[in-house]
Image (tube, rainbow, N blue to C red):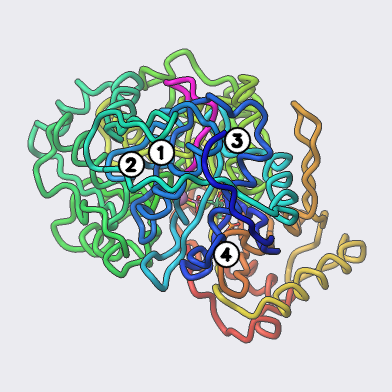
């Protein structure tokens, strides 16, 4: 072991949330804060000495500084080799891809995903394991427990390395390879999708598309894949240069935050296809001309059409969706005669199912879709999947989705977020619901009768691990559903998420506006949870 041992004291707030440890930048910049967490990761990993780790981030403020610290700590902790994305950049799905392809021991991803960046914004660190996926809760909990007892960390006092030149350098005994962050990932995409066919669609000239990278990590990937390899016109990629503060924006691909794209897609002379991704490149929003595809519908459409895409020609072994995601995918699974799994929120819960080949496609309502090609959700992958479908089916996005509804029925769906509300009352809202669960069954709320009410708990079918208190579910006799949960990714106060869903089979009723179609459930949610009372808000911050 080389390097200095630095004495430190534990911080008490280093428990990873839904997706890694996320805090304000100023919290991460406190002396020893990042170091304590990284050392806690190294301390709980068995067999990391001499191993290969992948390191990359979404380019947000503090990314470079954090990588230099990780390099010095890796050297002092006896790591054998680091694969680092050039410029310190690598999207979350690309890190997953590189871990798998190079058979690395694991990886560190520096990102707070869709949270804003910059000196006043957020930063985050996440550890992924050898399968390329987010560490399961047994590991994140061990990291947290370690962080509460840490007394020292190891670090060299070597100078910063050059992150911008590809090649190999040594820091003491550690080998650091600076690699192109895009090429391994782009190669995997070429393998999964029919690039020839997509190129033809794009080159006919009548097909017009936009991809909004929101000044986050997917810019370089989209330029290379969409413009260079698939021949889309320059200008197809909007906001394609990663910026440390994402240009002051909120790198969250939804109808509110991806406003440049939404304006174009709903304007006159709108393009045929529009998409956006988030800070770290794992989310996607899909739009047709003046048409929004909900992420839950997107998952269902991809599943129903997967056989049209080379990488999934052999069919799907199963589908998994997070609990609050709409049940549209379940209907497809049923028709295909395959299993559909319902997991807690967060991609880490899909890992075991994917590793055991129980499922091929996974999705979350929060603009996350992915498959067994990596162990993360994957924004550009979803975009390419849709492009491949458009090329094969020769229909518009809207036509494909409407045909899907006619065949399977429509799951009207919406999520209402109350962001940055006071944490204590938000906790009380959930606790009050939890306490009332036993008396809810059979009660009438508005015009509906409650069929079941519970606090979702999940037993992993592979390793038997149990995750409890994953969201309050209230199901009604007509099959509609309301879910309440608190976000595990925020860094300020609490965020209440209310998920609303109702199924419609009547062919005459497939064309309603989602908010009106869900109006009864929206007022039922208020009646059940007294949202106004507990949040002090009379409307949600974001509706998707
Ligand atoms: C949110 C989403 C969840 C997603 C998680 C990480 O978590 O709801 O579906 O897996 O973000 O996505 P929460 O706990 O805030 O609801 V990402 O792109 O921020 O890594
Ligand atoms: Co993300």
Q: Seen in the image, is 106 located left or right of residue 310?
A: right
Label disc, if present, on residue 399 of the rendered structure: 2
Pointer 3 or 2: first along the chain: 3
Q: Is the C-beta separation of discs 4 and 3 under 8 Å?
A: no
Q: In the rendered image of this protein, does residue 423 appear above or below residue 190?
A: below
> Residue 177 sits in which quadrant?
top left
Pointer 2 or 4: first along the chain: 2
Q: Is the C-beta separation of discs 3 and 1 under 8 Å?
A: no
Nearest the viewer among 270 and 509 is 270
Mark 1 vs mark 4: in front: 4
Q: Give the residue drawn at x 58%, y 20%.
A: 317
Residue range corresponding to the magenta coloring: 100-109
Residue indicated by mark 1:
403
Pointer 4 or 3: first along the chain: 3
Q: Residue furthest top?
A: 314
The image shows residue 101 at horizontal and vertical percentages of 42, 21
Label disc, if present, on residue 518 of the rendered structure: 4
The image shows residue 324 at horizontal and vertical percentages of 63, 51
Residue indicated by mark 3:
331
């Amino acid at each position: 072991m080389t390097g200095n041992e630095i004495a430190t004291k534990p911080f008490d707030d280093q428990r990873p949330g839904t997706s890694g440890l996320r805090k304000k930048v100023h919290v991460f910049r406190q002396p020893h804060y990042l170091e304590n967490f990284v050392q806690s990761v190294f301390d709980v990993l068995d067999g990391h000495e001499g191993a290969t780790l992948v390191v990359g981030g979404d380019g947000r403020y503090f990314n470079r500084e954090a990588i230099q610290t990780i390099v010095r700590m890796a050297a002092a902790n006896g790591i054998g080799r680091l694969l680092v994305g050039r410029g310190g950049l690598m999207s979350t799905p690309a890190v997953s891809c590189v871990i798998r392809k190079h058979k690395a021991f694991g990886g560190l991803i520096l990102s707070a995903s869709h949270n804003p960046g910059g000196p006043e914004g957020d930063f985050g660190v996440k550890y992924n394991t050898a399968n390329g996926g987010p560490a399961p809760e047994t590991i994140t909990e061990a990291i947290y427990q370690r962080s509460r007892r840490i007394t020292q960390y190891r670090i060299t006092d070597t100078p910063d390395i050059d992150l911008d030149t590809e090649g190999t350098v040594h820091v003491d005994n550690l080998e650091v390879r600076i690699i192109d962050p895009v090429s391994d990932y782009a190669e995997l995409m070429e393998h999964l999708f029919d690039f020839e066919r997509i190129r033809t669609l794009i080159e006919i000239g009548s097909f017009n598309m936009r991809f909004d990278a929101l000044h986050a990590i997917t810019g370089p990937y989209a330029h290379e894949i969409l413009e260079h390899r698939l021949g889309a016109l320059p200008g197809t990629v909007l906001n394609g240069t990663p910026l440390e503060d994402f240009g002051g924006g909120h790198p969250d691909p939804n109808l509110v935050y991806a406003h440049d794209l939404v304006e174009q897609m709903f304007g006159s002379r709108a393009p045929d296809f529009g998409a956006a991704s988030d800070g770290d490149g794992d989310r996607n929003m899909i739009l047709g001309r003046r048409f929004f595809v909900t992420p839950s519908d997107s998952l269902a459409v991809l599943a129903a059409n997967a056989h049209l895409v080379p990488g999934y020609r052999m069919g799907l072994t199963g589908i998994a969706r997070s609990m609050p995601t709409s049940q549209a995918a379940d209907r497809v699974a049923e028709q295909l005669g395959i299993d559909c799994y319902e997991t807690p929120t967060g991609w880490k819960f899909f890992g075991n199912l994917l590793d055991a080949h129980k499922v091929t496609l996974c999705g979350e309502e929060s603009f996350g879709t992915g498959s067994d090609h990596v162990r993360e959700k994957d924004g550009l992958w979803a975009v390419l999947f849709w492009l491949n479908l458009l090329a094969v089916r020769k229909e518009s996005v809207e036509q494909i989705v409407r045909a899907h509804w006619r065949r399977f029925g429509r799951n009207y769906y919406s999520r209402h977020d109350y962001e940055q509300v006071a944490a204590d009352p938000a906790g009380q809202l959930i606790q009050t619901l939890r306490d009332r669960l036993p008396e809810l069954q059979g009660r009438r709320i508005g015009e509906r009768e409650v069929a079941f009410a519970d606090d979702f708990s999940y037993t992993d079918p592979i390793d038997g691990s149990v995750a409890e208190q994953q969201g309050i579910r209230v199901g009604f006799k007509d099959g509609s559903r309301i879910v309440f949960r608190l976000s595990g990714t925020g860094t300020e106060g609490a965020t209440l998420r209310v998920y609303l869903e109702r199924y419609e089979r009547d062919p005459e009723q497939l064309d309603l506006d989602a908010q009106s179609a869900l109006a009864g459930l929206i007022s039922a949610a208020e009646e059940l949870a007294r949202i106004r009372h507990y949040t002090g808000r009379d409307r949600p911050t974001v509706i998707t």
